[in-house]
Amino acid sequence: MVVLDERRPLYEIKANLFKGLAHPYRIRVLEILSAADEASVADMLAETGLEASHLSQHLSVLRRYGLVVSERRASVVYYRLALPQIAELLRVARVLLGEILTDADSQRELVNSLPTIPDAR
Amino acid sequence: MVVLDERRPLYEIKANLFKGLAHPYRIRVLEILSAADEASVADMLAETGLEASHLSQHLSVLRRYGLVVSERRASVVYYRLALPQIAELLRVARVLLGEILTDADSQRELVNSLPTIPDAR
DNA sequence: TGCTGAATTGATGGAATCATCATATCAATT
DNA sequence: AATTGATATGATGATTCCATCAATTCAGCA
């Protein structure tokens, strides 16, 4: 089942992309692959500390959504991002989240710096 | 329950952001709000063709994930993106998906334009 | 106050997802 | 061919998510 299939309505394609990204471990995996360009399952097991079959399931989700590709060399399976744009998307998300979080911080600071209004309920 | 809370581990924050985006109708809503800056529930009902309570549930998800904010003026409720960066993220996703899809297209074209190799299995 | 339109909430059933465990495959080695 | 190490698949229960329907809240108006 190919999920990033241009024959589907665009909103669904977009939602499926985000669905593939919608789990902390999968983000973790994709960022490992963004940084390392290629990683074996063993590498990712070591980096994430996940149980083998659990990681494998998430890798299978990522494969199903067309976000990663795998290749077996000898008995080791190597994973790679299916498209370099995925790293770019994660990078943008990271930057935006950074802005959002520091925005939240500065807003909180701003609020805390305001003079206290007695009984302002 | 605030989901974009900087006290949580970063992977979870990121995954929650993507979870909020992980449904076609929510993408639809967010793009309406990206374009229009502000929209009433009635506007969105008209544009999406959803049933009222169904739309409301998705709006509630978006509120829960901190992606939109709402404001009631008289009997009408208006929604807005919680942060302009969300429109930016969608824009980037749209561009990247465009590249991905045309990449897929051009690869398919490339493959189809190759000379046929007899019995190349 | 009671009615109406706008929006939300609650309840429900069904589907999808998550996490764990056991089992299976696959390739290299003995 | 039997064993081992690496990875994947299948089965299960728990949880979350989706869609529909009924019931509720809230503001404005008769």
Image (cartoon, coloured by chain):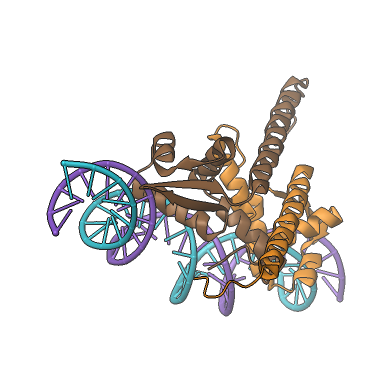
Chain colours: A orange, B brown, C purple, D cyan
User: Residue A56 at x, y = what percent?
Assistant: 67, 63
- Would residue B42 be visible to someone looking at this image? yes
**Residue at 68% of width from left, 47% of height from top?**
B85
Seen from the viewer's position, the closer of residues D14 and A72 is D14
The quarter of the picture where the C terminus of chain B appears is: top right
Q: Quadrant of residue A50?
A: bottom right
Report the residue that reaches farthest toward the front: A118
Seen from the viewer's position, the closer of residues B118 and B43 is B43
Task: Please give left or right for residue A45 compared with residue A17 in the image.
Answer: right
Q: Quadrant of residue B31?
A: top right
Answer above or below: position of A30 versus B80: below
Answer above or below: position of B117 versus A66: above
User: Residue B37 at x, y = what percent?
Assistant: 57, 39
Answer above or below: position of A100 versus C24: above
User: Residue B117 at x, y = what percent?
Assistant: 77, 24
**Residue at 60% of width from left, 33% of height from top?**
A6
**Residue at 42% of width from left, 37% of height from top?**
B43
- Would residue A1 be visible to someone looking at this image? no
Task: Please give left or right for residue A13 compared with residue B61 in the image.
Answer: right
Answer above or below: position of A66 versus A46: above
Task: Please give left or right for residue B78 compared with residue C26 in the image.
Answer: left
Seen from the viewer's position, the closer of residues B104 and B118 is B104
User: Residue D15 at x, y = what percent?
Assistant: 48, 71
Task: Please give left or right for residue A40 compared with residue B69 in the image.
Answer: right
